């Protein structure tokens, strides 16, 4: 078994450990933020951490009403801009905590008066030392180059922060159980992978809370399977990109129940007319029925709780597809675990 697969299977336990160990700390930080005059949240990340932050942006804006921005580190590192951040919460998100540009942004944000948080898997990292407070993912060392358990750990922290800062009740304590249930789809995933063993391009679509997952699965397919994977919102896909779809073209969809359901069904209808190949990761029976093939994620959950259980079978798909293509997912060509850029 590859390290990537081992770490995918470690996720439910890692999520449980993080909740138990850090819930009180997140509540304390949330109380401080609620009492502060913060009217902007800025998320700073790269790679998979940036995809987790894209999810975090949706979740935090919906649950807190505070505008959330995804930082462009080059604004600081290349252009030397000085931003006014005295009423901002700036959150750095990094598996290693050693991304040079991310840490520079956090440092500059502190100088500009922001309250800073670090979300990282490494408690002794540079990022953890720079930030006012560090939120540590209890995932253990991540050895595979492809991030899996730290990606879901970062997402979990956004649930915990949203619950502590906002007014919406989120049952994030159910997420480890739901992730464990999603691991039960592995045999189905293996069966589907055989059909896609020779896939060299595809589109991944997701919307709203699962938009970040579309970016993350596309990244995993590119780095572990060498598949050219484009990613889109299912709404944006109608505005031009649909033109690239032809007969048997593979489209992978994150299709939960909830407010995005109707647009996803409309897209599946159009894909059917084009005779495209669609694979849905879903908890909705109608979306599963309208897709060429599907992975029906078990467990009762509303749309807000779907992103972590949905990414688990997607990670399994990438790991098993990599093996089917004869590629080592733990050692993608040209990549390193820690990337330092300015």
Image: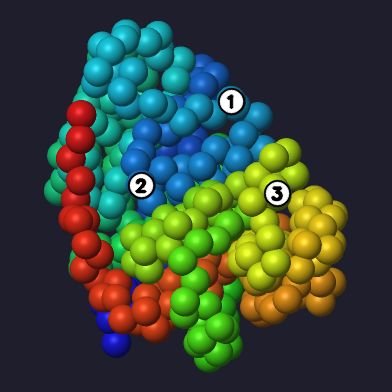
Report whether residue 301 is seen. Answer: no
CA distance separating discs 1 and 2? 22 Å
Q: Residue at x 27, y 33 (%)?
A: 102
CA neighbours of label 2 inside 10 A, class few (<14), some (14 to 19), many (20+)? some
Left or right, 141 with reference to 112: left
Identify the residue under disc 2: 47
Residue 201 lies, with reference to residue 96, above or below; the image says below
Q: Which numbered disc, 2 or 3, marks the residue closer to the eye? A: 3
Left or right, 115 with reference to 55: left
Q: Which quadrant of the rendered structure holds the C terminus?
A: top left
The kind of secondary structure element at disc 1 is: loop
The kind of secondary structure element at disc 2 is: helix
Q: Which numbered disc, 1 or 3, marks the residue closer to the eye? A: 3
Q: Residue at x 59, y 25 (%)?
A: 67
The kind of secondary structure element at disc 3 is: helix
Lower position in the chain sequence, tag 1 or tag 3: 1
Lower position in the chain sequence, tag 1 or tag 2: 2
Q: Residue at x 54, y 29 (%)?
A: 68
In the rendered structure, find residue 67 and report the number of the disc placed on it. 1
Q: Residue at x 34, y 60 (%)?
A: 223
CA neighbours of label 3 inside 10 A, class few (<14), some (14 to 19), many (20+)? some
Name the spot of residue 251 as percent of width and height, x first.
63, 63
Residue 84 lies, with reference to residue 110, above or below; the image says above
Lower position in the chain sequence, tag 2 or tag 3: 2
Say whether marks 2 and 3 touch (CB < 8 Å). no
Identify the residue under disc 3: 242
Name the spot of residue 293 as percent of width and height, x first.
69, 78
Q: What is the total number of numbered labels drawn onto the structure image?
A: 3
């Amino acid at each position: 078994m590859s390290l990537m697969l081992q770490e995918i299977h470690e996720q439910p336990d890692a999520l449980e450990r993080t909740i138990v160990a850090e819930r009180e700390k997140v509540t304390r930080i949330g109380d401080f933020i609620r009492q502060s005059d913060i009217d902007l949240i800025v998320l700073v990340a790269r790679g998979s951490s940036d995809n987790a932050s894209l999810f975090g942006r949706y979740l935090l804006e919906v649950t807190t009403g505070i505008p959330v921005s995804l930082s462009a580190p080059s604004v600081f590192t290349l252009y030397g801009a000085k931003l006014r951040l005295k009423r901002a919460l700036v959150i750095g998100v990094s598996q290693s905590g050693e991304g040079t540009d991310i840490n520079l942004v956090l440092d500059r944000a502190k100088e500009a008066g922001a309250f800073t948080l670090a979300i990282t898997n490494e408690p002794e990292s540079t990022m953890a030392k720079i930030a006012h407070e560090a939120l540590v993912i209890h995932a253990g060392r991540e050895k595979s180059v492809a991030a899996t358990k730290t990606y879901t750990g970062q997402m979990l922290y956004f649930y915990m922060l949203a619950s502590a800062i906002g007014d919406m009740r989120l049952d994030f304590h159910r997420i480890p159980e739901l992730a464990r249930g999603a691991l039960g789809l592995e045999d189905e995933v293996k069966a589907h992978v055989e059909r896609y063993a020779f896939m060299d391009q595809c589109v991944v679509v997701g919307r709203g809370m699962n938009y970040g997952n579309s970016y993350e699965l596309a990244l995993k397919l590119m780095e572990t399977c060498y598949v050219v994977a484009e990613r889109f919102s299912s709404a944006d896909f109608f505005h031009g990109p649909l033109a690239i779809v032809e007969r048997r073209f593979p489209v992978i969809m994150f299709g939960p129940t909830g407010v995005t359901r109707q647009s996803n069904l409309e897209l599946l209808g159009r894909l059917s007319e084009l005779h495209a190949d669609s694979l849905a990761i879903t908890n909705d029976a109608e979306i599963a029925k309208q897709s060429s093939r599907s992975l029906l994620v078990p467990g009762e959950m509303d749309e807000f709780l779907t992103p972590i259980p949905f990414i688990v079978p997607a990670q399994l798909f990438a790991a098993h597809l990599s093996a089917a293509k004869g590629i080592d997912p733990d050692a993608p060509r040209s990549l390193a675990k820690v990337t330092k850029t300015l």
